[in-house]
């Protein structure tokens, strides 16, 4: 059974824009093992250019690309610094020559040149200057470029009045948030060791030397204090490296204040996410003291393994990036509740790959084994079920937008209703899909898919951004009372 009459498709499309480019380091031949490095050969050829020709080449490059990037010369200089060890020690390169070397070791990358999909939507931190019935929102997007490399981008839009929706212009040079160090939590490091099976005398000794919050220098000092009788154990090196990897995977990102949200790019910054940051589920979180912040879970992919990680931000300008630990974080698709429930931090998950579950964060920073909420049962969802973002709080209960996979790997969107005080209880469910791919939405990078990472409630409606066949983003609006009225008790 489907429930098509509930959904109003808003006719607004957010399409991938190949003009949205960043600059990446380019190293010719880095995937081969030549007798002599192509890097060295290229630098030798650049140094043979005449002074005038080199300056003209640099001037032309800055003219062609300067308007497409923020502070292009600084990026060229940074890339020069990364390869300068290949420059002969006797060479005295002029500032212009260094910039030109950096230009040769740079290339543009279209962050959404392949696809744009899997959005989530949260209220914008700035709601100033709006008329009645309007809400400014931030839309997170999964942007996919060459090599199926995913990163996290943003758009902004205005909702209302009525069913009006206007997406703001996204043109202008993009900025990749620079990585910074961040204080590390000892309890999360301990949780990582438990997950990785490295809970032993060496790790316990290092942890015992660390304060509750520690930095990289504190960590190295703790390792240096390991007693000799532990240093001689055959497992010590592997344990220390596991500790170091776990610590290095957490970091912070800070964007310049004058870079608008829609020009910010969260780009993979560690080995564990080197092949992509996927499907961010943002939520505006209200803490027990009433303080708001933004949180998002996302999937990190290193080319072989996936890991659940979290972004935390007060303003969507600075972000702390940490790993999620525990049995419930073993798979994709965690979605945080927007506030503590009964003093507990809760999340939806799909740790077994096919069942929607409810998990709680324990005092050690680990997401515990989930309680099953919803298993594949309808014909449209027999392959697997999961969430489409964080639960939405209503007077009737927690509204959970779901997804299910049916025949021919066709994705559709449904809904559950959980008890407000006892969210492990499913009190109602939509008897069939709320939204399924129509003829226009079924064609794309991954056909026959509609998928969302989170909507929000505004006015009397659910506003839902969703990816259409992993190619572009569409928007829908659903009257909340009608949606709740169509749900059926029991499960």
Image: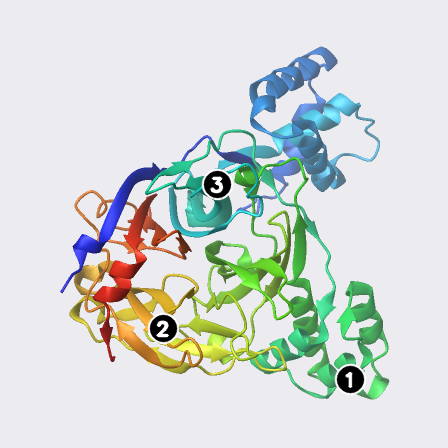
Q: Are marks 3 and 1 in contact (CB under 8 Å)?
A: no
Q: Is residue 28 above or below residue 382?
A: above
Q: Are marks 3 and 2 in contact (CB under 8 Å)?
A: no
Q: Is residue 218 above or below residue 118?
A: below
Mark 3 or mark 2, earlier in chain: 3
Q: Nearer the viewer, residue 313 or 286?
A: 286
Disc number placed over residue 156 in the picture, else none: 3
Q: Nearer the viewer, residue 435 or 180?
A: 435
| Residue 253 drawn at (x, y percent) | 66, 51
Residue under numbered circle 1: 205
**Crowd band around label 2 with a 10 angstrom C-alpha radius: few (<14), some (14–19), many (20+):** some
**Crowd band around label 3 with a 10 angstrom C-alpha radius: few (<14), some (14–19), many (20+):** many
Element at badge 1? helix
The answer to which quarter of the image holds residue 389 is: bottom left
The answer to which quarter of the image holds residue 17 is: top left
Q: Is residue 352 above or below residue 181?
A: below
Give the residue displayed 46% in from the left and 30% down from the top.
Answer: 19
**Residue 24 left/right relative to 442:** right
Mark 1 or mark 2, earlier in chain: 1
| Residue 53 drawn at (x, y percent) | 67, 13
**Residue 179 left/right relative to 215:** left
Q: Nearer the viewer, mark 1 or mark 2?
A: 2
Give the residue displayed 71% in from the left and 35% down from the top.
Answer: 80
Q: Quadrant of the C terminus?
A: bottom left
**Crowd band around label 1 with a 10 angstrom C-alpha radius: few (<14), some (14–19), many (20+):** some
Element at badge 3? strand
Give the residue displayed 41% in from the left and 78% down from the top.
Answer: 423
Mark 3 or mark 1, earlier in chain: 3
Q: Is residue 25 visible?
A: no
Residue under numbered circle 2: 353
Residue ranking furthest to the top: 52
Q: Nearer the viewer, mark 3 or mark 2?
A: 3
């Amino acid at each position: 059974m489907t429930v098509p009459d509930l959904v109003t498709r808003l006719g607004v499309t957010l399409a991938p824009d190949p003009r949205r480019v960043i600059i990446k380091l380019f190293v010719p031949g880095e995937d081969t093992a030549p007798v002599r490095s192509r890097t060295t050969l290229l630098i030798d050829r650049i140094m043979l250019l005449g002074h005038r020709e080199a300056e003209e080449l640099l001037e032309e490059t800055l003219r062609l690309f300067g308007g497409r990037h923020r502070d292009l010369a600084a990026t060229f200089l940074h890339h020069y610094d990364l390869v300068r060890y290949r420059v002969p020690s006797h060479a005295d390169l002029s500032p212009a020559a260094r910039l030109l070397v950096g230009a040769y070791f740079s290339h543009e990358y279209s962050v959404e040149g392949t696809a744009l999909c899997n959005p989530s939507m949260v209220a914008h931190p700035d709601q100033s200057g709006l008329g009645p019935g309007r809400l400014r929102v931030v839309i997170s997007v999964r942007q996919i470029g060459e090599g199926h490399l995913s990163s996290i981008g943003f758009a902004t839009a205005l909702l209302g009045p009525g069913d009006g929706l206007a997406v703001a212009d996204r043109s202008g040079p993009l900025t990749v948030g620079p990585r910074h160090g961040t204080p590390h939590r000892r309890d999360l490091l301990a949780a990582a060791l438990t997950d990785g099976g490295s809970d032993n005398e060496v790790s316990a000794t290092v942890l015992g030397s660390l304060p509750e919050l520690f930095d990289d220098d504190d960590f190295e000092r703790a390792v240096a204090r390991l007693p000799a009788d532990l240093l001689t154990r055959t497992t010590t090196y592997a344990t220390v490296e596991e500790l170091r990897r776990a610590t290095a995977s957490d970091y912070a990102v800070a964007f310049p204040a004058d870079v608008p949200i829609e020009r910010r790019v969260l780009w993979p910054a560690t080995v564990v996410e080197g092949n992509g940051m996927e499907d961010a589920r943002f939520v505006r979180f209200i803490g027990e003291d009433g303080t708001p912040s933004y949180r998002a879970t996302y999937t990190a992919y290193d080319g072989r393994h996936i890991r659940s990680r979290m972004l935390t931000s007060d303003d969507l300008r600075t972000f702390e990036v940490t790993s999620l630990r525990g049995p419930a974080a073993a798979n994709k698709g965690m979605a945080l509740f927007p506030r503590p429930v009964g003093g507990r931090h809760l999340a939806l998950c799909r740790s077994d790959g096919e069942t929607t579950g409810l998990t709680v964060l324990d005092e050690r920073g680990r997401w515990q084994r989930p309680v099953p909420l919803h298993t594949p049962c309808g014909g449209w969802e027999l392959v697997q079920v999961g969430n489409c973002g964080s639960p939405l709080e209503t007077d009737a209960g927690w509204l959970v937008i779901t997804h299910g996979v049916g025949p021919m790997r066709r994705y559709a969107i449904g809904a559950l209703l959980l008890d407000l005080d006892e969210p492990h209880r499913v009190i109602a469910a939509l008897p069939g899909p709320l939204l399924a791919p129509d003829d226009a939405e079924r064609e794309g990078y991954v056909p026959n898919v509609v998928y969302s990472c989170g909507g929000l409630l505004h006015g009397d409606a659910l506003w839902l951004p969703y990816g259409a066949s992993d190619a572009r983003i569409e928007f829908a609006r659903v009257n909340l009372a009608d949606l709740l009225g169509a749900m059926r008790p029991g499960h």
